[in-house]
Amino acid sequence: MARHKVAVVGAGIIGVATAVNIQTLCPDADVTIIAEKFSPDTTSDGAAGFVQPYLVVGTPDEDVMRWFVSTFEHLRKLILSLNAGKSGVHFTSGYNVFKHKVPDPNWKDDVIGFRIIPEKELQLLFPSFKYGWFFTTIMCESHRYIPFLTERFQKNGGVVMQRRISSFAELSGQYDVVVNCTGVWSRFLANDDSVRPVRGQVMRVSASWIKTHGRCPGSADGTDKYHVYAR
């Protein structure tokens, strides 16, 4: 029987992870990653891989939580493996602080050690804020995780092809399945004007004496005003 040919378009963290999972779930498939840019030149390489559910407009909460829990468990097992250092995945603890009291998140039991920050602790650490949480979650450094996955993909027989495409029609007849992992470039490739970038901002400061992170959401719905990471 002929092997199925699968193309994954896009080589960010979603594209490479998708390609590896296709290899695992469909061992009879020949998988190729096609992209114009690869790590360290992808958008994913500059992203903050802080594992916490975020608002996804139009997506049921149960789907978001299912994705979060499965991702957390996968990365937790990786942290406890011999590949932890190479993959750039580790536990991190820190604070979410707010200007006013907000409801507890529905994921509080799915992270480690979630607690409400006592008023005295909040006054000592974040005197300009009125409410907050402390918990331990996972940090996934994309600029290390993507090469880690790419190496695994190629060892499993995957092919990497550097190529810019302007339309999925260019791949017609060459592959049985084409998987779109191009992020905002889907606006053009899929002719979907509703696709747009959502801008976040990460500030990395030199403060080696600080061992935790701080996150200050702009509103109770999880929309970020800014992030500050110090390690």
Image (cartoon, rainbow, N blue to C red):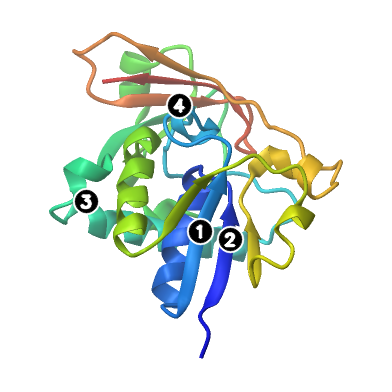
Q: Earlier in the sequence, mark 3 or mark 1?
A: 1
> Which residue is at the front of the view, 145 or 158?
158
Disc on the earlier residue, 1 or 4: 1
CA gap, disc 3 and disc 2:
29 Å
Q: Find disc 1 in the rendering and name its residue.
A: 32
Task: Tell me if mark 1 has few (under 14), some (14-19) or many (20+) residues whose alpha carbon lies within 10 angstroms of its own.
Answer: many
Residue type, label 2? Ala
Which numbered disc flags the more N-terminal residue, 3 or 2?
Answer: 2
Marks 2 and 4 sit apart, C-alpha to C-alpha, by 37 Å
Q: Residues within 10 Å of mark 2 (few under 14, many from 20)?
A: many
- Pointers 1 and 2 in contact (CB under 8 A)? yes
Of badges 1 and 4, nearer the viewer stands 1
Q: What residue is at 45 percent from the left and 26 percent from the top?
A: 215
Give the residue type that dot 1 points to.
Answer: Thr
Residue furthest to the bottom in view is 1
Above or below residue 38? Residue 18 is: below
Which residue lies under the disc numbered 3? 79
> Does the image show residue 23?
yes
